[in-house]
Image (cartoon, helix red, strand yellow):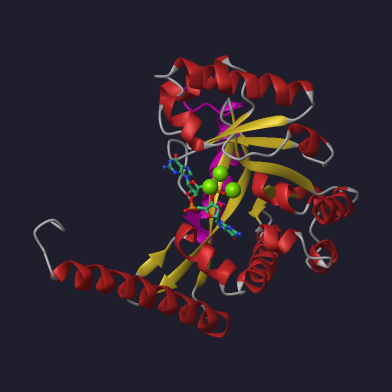
Amino acid sequence: RAKNSGGNQYVFVSNEISSAASEQSEIEAHMRAAFKDGGFEVYYQPQYSMNGYLCGFEALLRLRHPSMGLIGPDRFIPIAEECGLIVRIGNWVIEEVFRQAAEWKRQGLPAIRIALNVSPLQLMRADFSVRVRDALSAYRMDPEMLEIEITETTVMHNLEEVAKQMLDLAAVGVRFSVDDFGTGYSSLRHLHQLPITTLKIDQSFVQNICEDSSTREIVQAILSLAHSLGMQVIAEGVEREDQVELLRSMNCDQLQGFLWGRPQPADRVPALMSAQVRKFSAEGAFNRGVA
Ligand code: C2E
Ligand code: MG
Ligand code: MG
Ligand code: MG
């Protein structure tokens, strides 16, 4: 359509740029207001062992906007990182998730591991580990129930400070996983110096795993590498039964994906937990129709 628009082409492009810019500043303003008016919401996506046991939840942040609806983190986290709000948001997420976990515990629900995503800008701060440890004790949360997801980028830029923060938290039992593993450029040498318990295979691999044999080879290599280093592997973005079958045959440890559960608002979590408990007592073992 740009081809025939002649003199209007520039106008068209500049409108598009300015509307993107105004959307960006609207999101920024809305994030600033959300700290006092509400607007951030944490969703929880279940993580399962290969035979269907619920083993944890990943906390995934959303931003509710009156006219834009529920905005996903891929849209607003980069803006937050750019405008300097990410650390404040990250601190809010830590508080909110620990508060929620304490509330579930008070209701008598089984303790379950919760994974948090953190930005590199959080982890490179000298006060990160102290803040997390303070929040753990304030909410009486067992450090072993917390998993922190880092990305390969986090490790690349600030290895020394990041390692310090991670080792300090690992010493009290906090677990760490590497998110979107296989898409970044982190060196195994670096990763191996860090207290990492889990690799999360990026969903782009899982998507093609049944169709593409070289993807399958890469995933198999990640699995053997992780296992030989004593790490566990979670496959992300599992949407089909054939992917489950294949990942199980490859000895993958856990999975997360729309097939077995989408991210849910916090009030749906207790039902997911007690459905599991009921299944255990009714059948002795959890069975989702898979072996
Ligand atoms: P991530 O940590 O890799 O999270 C997985 C993303 O994949 C989530 O998107 C999840 O909803 C989506 N997903 C899960 N299963 C499937 C599936 O079967 N198929 C497909 N197509 N997608 C699936 P979401 O919630 O939009 O989050 C996007 C990213 O935003 C996250 O990627 C994470 O990097 C970031 N993020 C989320 N919450 C936070 C947060 O509190 N702080 C920071 N710094 N980043 C966050
Ligand atoms: Mg994640
Ligand atoms: Mg991921
Ligand atoms: Mg991602």
Residue in view at x 84 percent, y 52 percent: 160
Residues 215 and 142: in front is 215
Percent across and percent down for residue 229 are 79, 26
Position above or below: 78 against 230: below
Tell me if residue 236 can be seen.
yes
Quadrant assignment for the N terminus: bottom left
Task: Name the residue nearer the viewer: 28 or 273.
Answer: 28
Instruction: Check residue 245 for magenta coloring.
Output: no
Q: Residue at x 43, y 78 (%)?
A: 25
Q: Quadrant of residue 98?
A: bottom right
Foreground pick, 212 / 103: 212
Using the rendered view, name the quadrant where residue 259 is placed: top left
The percent coordinates of residue 62 (x first, y second) are 49, 63
Does residue 29 appear left or right of residue 286 in this picture?
left
- In the rendered image, the residue lying farthest to the left is 4
Q: Which residues are magenta?
A: 264-291
Say which residue appears at 69% left-offset and 67% top-offset: 99
Residue 245 versus residue 161 in the image, above or below: above
